[in-house]
Amino acid sequence: MIALFSTFLYLVPLNLFSVVFFLFFCSAPLLAILSAVRSLGTFEIACTKLEPQTVDCELVHKPYFPLFPTTKEIYSGIKGAQYDLETRREKDSEGDEITYTVHYVIFQKVTGQEKVEFEGDVAQFLVNHIQDFLKDNRPNSSAMIAREADLTFWLIIGPLLGFLAIGSLVATTVIYREWVEINPYCVIHTRIGLPWYKKVIRFTEIDCLKVTEEIAEESTRKIYTLKLVIQPRDGFRKSGQEIRLYAHNAPQEVLQLSQELADRMGVPQVLPKHLCSSS
């Protein structure tokens, strides 16, 4: 026996295609934007001389946006620093070759070399500071550089923002949450996504309850779906409308629920012919 409470709620599940669509069209530009935004902020370097030609340095990155944490890196036993860059070529998802430059600081340390990747301006700033500090007689030295949103930043972020906006707009048409609430007087059909709406449908606007039977994809299992059939009206609903309420692979469960709802609403049922006798 299916207990029918004062309110019946049906939540339409997300399908796998919707999730993949969102991940493909929105996650890549979003991650690229977050990475670019994270690089904005201040870089502070503080160095201490252990010996005339050996220093320890601490690098602190404070992003402008509190979403990202402050990071601290310590480089010990530095005897020199060198700026280096590398041109890389890779293929994108469409097979086209893309070229980009990666910037490094090569730390000459007591224990050997350490090659660390930085943004280009930060890498040159660190190398210049360490080299200058090794040449003078000061015991300590500190400096700071700020990375701002310059023209290059916006040339990179602009297209990504546009792609993300378009991808999000399209994604919300296939990724949405939808539910139907049936109270003692009316049906409330809510959808969060595009289009975004909340419709109140009176029982007098409902033609019937319709049960359909179909074969599940890549399976021989039958799925029985219970739908509300709304009367045609002037305006957007000239040809009527169907709202899916419930789906299950057990026909008796769907039929029982359909009967209970039909009795409550005072509307007829439309059933597959071979199920009419079992109802």
Image: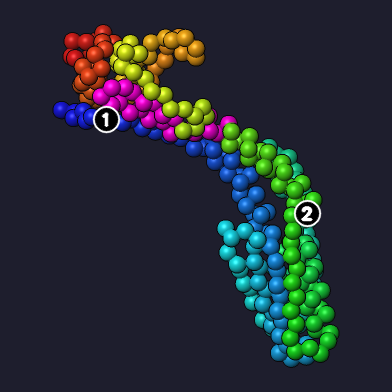
Q: Which is more N-terminal, label 1 or label 2?
A: 1
Q: Position of residue 27 (x, y in %)?
A: 58, 44
**Is 212 situated left or right of 238 in this image?**
left
Between circles 2 and 1, the one closer to the viewer is 1
Considering the numbered disc 2 on the image, is that residue within a helix, a strand or a loop?
Answer: loop
Considering the numbered disc 1 on the image, is that residue within a helix, a strand or a loop?
Answer: loop
Q: Residue sitting at 61 percent across and 68 percent down? A: 71
Return the residue nearer the eye: 152 or 85: 152
Return the residue nearer the eye: 87 or 172: 172
Tell me if residue 75 is in the magenta stretch.
Answer: no
Tell me if residue 189 is in the magenta stretch.
Answer: yes
Magenta segment range?
170-191
Q: Residues within 10 Å of mark 2 (few under 14, many from 20)?
A: few
Work out which residue is located at the far left of the displayed protein and give it.
1
Up/down of 263 relative to 7, above or below: above
Q: CA distance from mark 2 to mark 1?
A: 55 Å
Q: Residue sitting at 19 percent across and 14 percent down? A: 279
Residue type for callout 2: Asp
Q: Which mark is residue 150?
A: 2
Identify residue for label 1.
7
Q: Position of residue 36 (x, y in %)?
A: 68, 54
Residue type for callout 1: Thr
Q: Residue sitting at 66 percent across and 68 percent down? A: 61
Quadrant for the N terminus in the image: top left
**Is 153 situated left or right of 244 in this image?**
right
Q: Position of residue 128 (x, y in %)?
A: 82, 74
Whether residue 151 can be seen here: yes
Quarter of the figure with residue 270: top left
